[in-house]
Amino acid sequence: MERRLVDAFYERLDDDRFASTGHTPGPCSNESRHLEPPSALLVRALERCAPRPETLLSRVVFEVPVPVAELTVTASVERPGRTAQSLFVRER
């Protein structure tokens, strides 16, 4: 696969796989990144997981650090509910 320079944090490899670009490393280390780029990928996965028009995403909690690497991001419903539900997103 031919790689090209992009002005983005990630280059999409397929629907749930992304490659980090040179824009993702954080200010403290080239091995870990600042939280905004992976947060966007995680929220995207949450918004696409079992969408219900009558609900809103209200709270997101992250565990850090996130390495600079190729990522696969998936989300699933952990606890379904009528008025509230828990979603779980995994970044590997």
Image: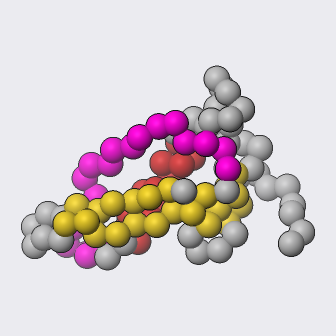
Colour pattern: secondary structure
Residue most toward the top? 28
- Write down the quadrant of residue 25 in the picture: top right
Q: Is residue 3 left or right of residue 33?
A: right
Residue most toward the right? 2
Residue 62 in sight here:
yes
Which residue lies at the image location 33% right of the left edge and 44% below the top edge?
61
Which residue lies at the image location 51% right of the left edge and 62% below the top edge?
73
Instruction: Depth check: give the residue in front, 26 or 79.
Output: 79
Q: Residue 56, percent across and down?
A: 25, 62
Q: Is residue 55 left or right of residue 3?
A: left
Q: Which residues are magenta?
A: 51-69
Q: What secondary structure do most residues of the magenta stretch adopt?
A: loop
Q: Is residue 66 left or right of residue 1?
A: left
Which quadrant is home to the N terminus? bottom right
Number of marks in picture: 0
Which residue lies at the image location 64% right of the left edge and 32% below the top edge?
26
Instruction: Depth check: give the residue in front, 38 or 72.
Output: 72
Which quadrant is home to the C terminus? bottom right
- Write down the quadrant of residue 48 in the picture: bottom left
Q: Residue 60, percent across and down?
A: 32, 48
Q: Is residue 64 left or right of residue 79?
A: right
Residue 41 in sight here:
no
Vertical comparison of 64 with 37: above or below: above
Residue most toward the front? 92
Residue 90 sits inside the magenta stretch: no
Which residue lies at the image location 23% right of the left edge and 61% below the top edge?
86
Residue 60 sits inside the magenta stretch: yes
Residue most toward the left? 83
